Structures are given as C-alpha cells and as structure tokens.
Amino acid sequence: MSKQQTTHVIGVHHVGLTARDPAALAAFYRDVLGLEVVGGSTTDTPDFGASAFLSSNPPEESHDLALFANPAFQHTAFKVRSLAHLRAMYQRVLGRGVPVKMAFNHGASLAFYFEDPEGHLLEVYWPTGVACRQPHADPIDLTLSEEAVRRTVRELAAQAGTPSAPGGAEPGGRW
C-alpha cells in the first residue's frame, strides 16, 4: 500500500447499544430522529437475543445504530476503505497481541471484533455492498487468501439473490 493508502479506519460508522426493549427503543429512534428500521428480531434468537437495526440511509450504510437486549453486543464500529485494509488491520491487531474475539461475514459487511484495554468491544468492518438483512453472522477466517474471502461473500450474495457488490467494489471497480 502507498502512503496515501495506509491502513487506518475512516471513522466511526455505527454503534451498538444495549436496550431493555430493542423494538420500543427502535420506535423511538424511528419516530424522533427519522431512522428507518432495517432489521432485527423482536424475540430472542439463539445468536443475538432481541435486536433492532436502524439506518439513516439504507442504500449507503446497512445500519447506523444496532440495539441489543444482550449487553455483550454493545460496541463501536469503525469502517475501513477496502478488504485489503480490513485484512491489514486484522493483522495489526493480532500483531499487537490483542485477541480477536470473533470475525463474521455479516453479508452487508465483513468484520472482526476485539476489546480495547478498558474492555470496550470494538468492531472493524468493510462494507461488501451485499444487501443482507441484519442480524446475520457467518464466521469467517480473515487469514484465508483474499480471493477465498471474496468467494465467500459472492456465495452469500448468490444465496441472498443479491448482486455482488457495487457498494463493496473497491476503487477502480475491483471486487
């Protein structure tokens, strides 16, 4: 990567908050801030419990806010520019001796999670451009070759009947 393409996050792009009643809190954010409810489950699911996902601009970001009944999923998510940046950031975190708690193909993004020294859960993600209702989480091995990771995303997009991946295409149209 050139100096201009140095691996770094490009900002905080969503937060996951704990909610006693994710559906009721989602209605508040919908009615007061105008966010659109784009996913979630009003009942406990084995993986996530009750949840709600909201977006201010669904075509651009799958969600800006995630609400979880389970406090273990409270987190802050940072976005990177490309799959190469995601994989480089993954190696940087591991190289600093920070354990990665999990890595997922969320359909709409590829992400990995780890804790800061104070125990806050952080997510680093790259949006794939695949439209996939949240929550969705298939484990993914980010140490696989870039082509193997991309193949996994294409397979999920095909299963979902979604074209892969105008939003996830990297500069120069490389996907």
Image (tube, grey):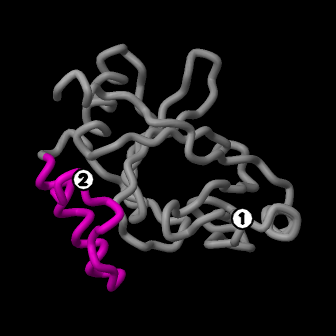
What x and y, as percent, mark residue 13?
A: 56, 45
Vertical comparison of 38 with 83: above or below: below
Residue 46 part of the magenta-drawn span: no
Q: The C terminus lies in which quarter of the figure?
A: bottom left
Q: Are marks 1 and 2 in contact (CB under 8 Å)?
A: no
Where disc 2 sits, the SS reads loop
Q: Residue at x 19, y 58 (%)?
A: 150
Q: Which residue is mark 2?
A: 170
Range drawn in magenta: 146-175
Is residue 110 at least partly visible in the picture? yes
Is residue 175 at least partly visible in the picture? no
Name the main secondary structure of what is drawn in magenta.
Answer: helix
Query: Which quarter of the figure has residue 138?
Result: bottom left
What x and y, as percent, mark residue 56?
A: 65, 63
Label whose residue precedes the other's in the sequence (1 or 2) = 1
Q: Which residue is mark 1?
A: 50
Q: Residue at x 31, y 28 (%)?
A: 7
